[in-house]
Amino acid sequence: MNALPRPASGPAPDEAKTAAAAPALALRRIVLSDFRSYRRAELAVPAKPVVLFGPNGAGKTNLLEAISLLAPGRGLRRARIVEIERRDAAGPGWAIFATLDTPAGERSIGTGRDPAGRGPDRAPDDEASDRRVVRIDGAPAKGQAALAELVHLLWLTPEMDRLFDGGASERRRFLDRIVLGFVPDHGRNLAGYEQAMRERNRLLKDGRLDETWLGALEQSMAETGVAVAAARRQVVGRLAIAAEAALGPFPIPDIALAGETEAELGAAPALAAEDTLRRRLAEGRRADAEAGRARAGPHRSDLVVRHRAKAMPAALCSTGEQKALLVALVLAAARLLKLQRGAAPILLLDEIAAHLDAERRAALFDEIEALGAQAWMTGTDAQLFQALGGRAAFFMVAAPPGEGTTLRPAPQPSSTR
Ligand SMILES: Nc1ncnc2c1ncn2[C@@H]1O[C@H](COP(=O)(O)OP(=O)(O)OP(=O)(O)O)[C@@H](O)[C@H]1O
Ligand SMILES: [Mg+2]
């Protein structure tokens, strides 16, 4: 549980900084059916960064959301399965089909709404109608964890601009997405922890103090909770070092993890941390019942970020500085992932040019090239990406009335307007 797997054949650190070869992990073709504003769309792209431009409401973020569903979870909007379905769709449910270049060769992923979740006997909020199915290389995958073995991807969306101002849960989610790239089982552990916690909350709320049942749930929370905390701790430790590498105009973030279980893992073995968490949960039942939630456990941890040069908590930095800190964190995670997995993650950078000045934009593009990452970038104006030149493929996203969203290759923007 404690040891992160080592890279099988990752490049040497120096190489990782300078290589500008084609991304080893890249989406090459994606087909969408009844996915949000897309009736049916097909896009074939080269193994290099992609720019999607077009007016507000054209369907740029929808496409990034579709790509984000090639990883486990609910995608970059955290949407419910039924919300994703194109309104007015009459078909068998939304679907995404993708082929990718991976270090293990060409692979395909199909995912979509579980057909069993549809039909006249199903209410729209039925649990089964909120499930998605996954096929890998044509064969049904048991669960979404198989996706984490195959693809790793990270995203930045405009909603995340307030990541440092808001509550800890968004920062945990941001961190957990990074951890998932290193520990494919992280998603399973998190889901197991949350499920046991929900069930315990329900028992406590109903006043059903069944010792055996509560004890079993707390045991499960302790095991999965310590696995979650250990994975976060190791990744944050490595990320803090990776983030030390100065990236031109991007600030160096100091990062740390705040959480009791994570802290205990620094001083004691995992089994001792499990005992502590289980004991704290058992002792806290009465107070937890009153509070309506568990007051101990890694669901309360936080990712603490500071702007090193300014010696300032991230939350007190300007909007642009916060964005630059976030970009620095994502790039550090991408560098580490490349070392670990032999391929940089696919990056989904929605409206990335907003809040970045021309110097930072150019530095970001250079870093993406050096990483060899297939970054998908969106914006309303192609000119914002002009510094990428031929290093990216450009596509225009449009929504002609009555047609659903369309995608068309476009020339790279020229230097004069
Ligand atoms: N389930 C759905 N069915 C049909 N259309 C949908 C569905 N969900 C969202 N849409 C529509 O998809 C359109 C495109 O949304 P999207 O967020 O992708 O736009 P965008 O190109 O990213 O725009 P912006 O530049 O404003 O961010 C919106 O008009 C939205 O109303
Ligand atoms: Mg958008």
Image (tube, rainbow, N blue to C red):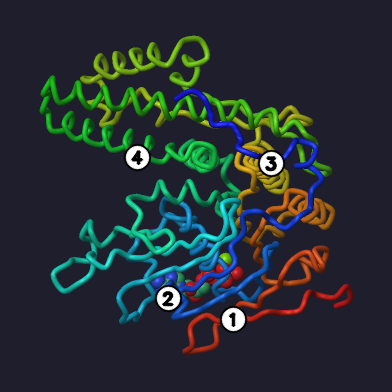
Precedes in sequence: disc 1 or disc 4: 4
Mark 1: amino acid: Ala
| Ligand 2: image quarter | bottom right
Residue denoted by label 2: 33
* Residue that extends furthest to the right in the rendered view of this protein: 416
Alpha carbon distance from label 1 to label 4: 38 Å
Mark 2: amino acid: Ser
Q: Position of residue 136 (x, y in %)?
A: 42, 58
**Mark 1 neighbour class, 10 Å CA radius: few under 14, some 14 to 19, many 20 or more:** many
> Of discs 1 and 2, which sits in the foreground?
2
Is 379 or 11 nearer to us in this picture?
A: 11
Is 306 or 188 nearer to us in this picture?
A: 188
Alpha carbon distance from label 3 to label 1: 34 Å
**Mark 3 neighbour class, 10 Å CA radius: few under 14, some 14 to 19, many 20 or more:** many
Question: Which of the 4 quarters of the picture holds residue 335?
Answer: top right
Mark 4: amino acid: Ala
Q: Position of residue 1 (x, y in %)?
A: 44, 25
Tag on residue 347? none
The answer to whether the residue bearing label 3 lies less than 8 angstroms from the nearest atom of ligand 2 is no
Instruction: Label 4, secondary structure: give it.
Output: helix
**Mark 4 neighbour class, 10 Å CA radius: few under 14, some 14 to 19, many 20 or more:** few
Mark 3: amino acid: Arg
Precedes in sequence: disc 2 or disc 4: 2
> Of discs 3 and 1, which sits in the foreground?
3
Tag on residue 398? 1
Precedes in sequence: disc 3 or disc 2: 2
Tag on residue 335? 3
Instruction: Label 1, secondary structure: give it.
Output: strand
